[in-house]
Amino acid sequence: MNLGGSDDLHSLEAEQVVRAIERACESDLRTALRLVARYSAYWWSRGLQDEAAAAAERVLSMLGRTVPVGLDEEYLLAVIHGAASAEQEQVELAQQIVLTTTGPFRYSVTVLLWSLVFGPFEPAEVVEEVLERNEAGDAWTRAAVELCRGYPGLTSAAPADAADALRTALGRFRMLEDRWGMFLAVTALRYVVDEPLDLTTEALELAEELCLAEETGILLCERGDQYRALGKLEDAHNDYLQALSIGEAAELPETVAAARIGLARTARGSGKHSTARLHLSVVLALPDLEDAHFEALHELSALNASEASA
């Protein structure tokens, strides 16, 4: 597993894009807004949402509540990227753009990003109306529509219908040879099937190919949990150990904590109580991780009970 070199290259490319947008902000806001829209899929497919947010926030801070003529969808994409810090009036303008747009969006990625960011807060009928409208889009958009139809929490689809939609999306993204789309479909499909191990492995392989360090660490921990539930403690240990390495290298404290808790549980299952206790002590020493601390304390109680009954 080698995530370092390509990940560094992606970060360098992202910095260059952000600098180009910053330069455009000084002379031509329309160009800056178009650049934000143009690089939307690039940012998200590489796990660079923070860079997307930084660029969008800069443009939105200068545009305020003014939507440039002819750039409605570009403005919408900027608000999607900068949703965490956008003004309420900007969010309302973006919502109005969605409601008044007829036909499919001009940018293939818009329907997907809108669905993921704002879809969970919209009525199911509004989401479905937007998806229906974009069924007339290009092949990638049609695949994205099926992905959104099956995505957990976006629509009122029954589990079986959601699974069918996600499998359709996966098949379409495979035909397009789009690994990011495949990754999104596979990761979502894991939540609506009874035995997700094979899908988790496929999602993990795609995350590695896409150089998504954070997602790779999370998936390794999830597969470790699945192996542990099956009694495959050695396989689980190996996955947690790889996740720990990624988390430490990429400075991802949540991943480090999840990996160490998994290692502690595996160690307890193997009767290695002192090793388990060491992993938990490291987690409890990590700052600002309330959920991880709670989980570590719960595992510590299980460890104490195991030792008491030995």
Image: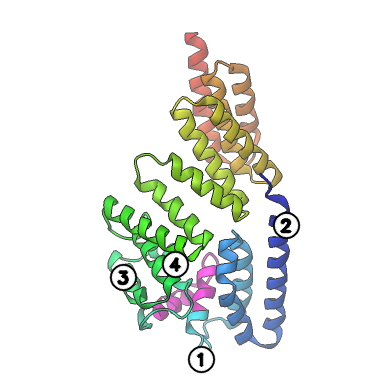
Mark 1 to mark 3: distance in Å? 25 Å
Q: Residue 8 carries which label?
A: 2
- Judge by depth and name the residue closer to the eye, 199 or 30: 199
Per the image, the residue denoted by label 1 is: 69
Count of numbered badges drawn on the protein: 4
Label 1 CA crowd tier, 10 Å (few <14, some 14–19, many 20+): few
Label 4 CA crowd tier, 10 Å (few <14, some 14–19, many 20+): some
Per the image, the residue denoted by label 4 is: 112
Whether tag 4 and tag 1 are in contact, CB under 8 A, the answer is: no
What amino acid is labelled 3 in the image?
Val
* Image quadrant occupied by the N terminus: top right
**x%, y% of residue 226?**
46, 34
First along the sequence among labels 4 and 2:
2
Q: Which residue is drawn at 60% across and 86% down?
A: 30
What amino acid is labelled 1 in the image?
Val
What amino acid is labelled 2 in the image?
Asp
Q: Under tag 1, what secondary structure?
A: loop
Per the image, the residue denoted by label 3 is: 126
**x%, y% of residue 161?**
27, 55
**72 relative to 289, above or below:** below
- Judge by depth and name the residue closer to the eye, 178 or 194: 178
- Judge by depth and name the residue closer to the eye, 8 or 168: 168
The magenta-colored residue range is 75-98
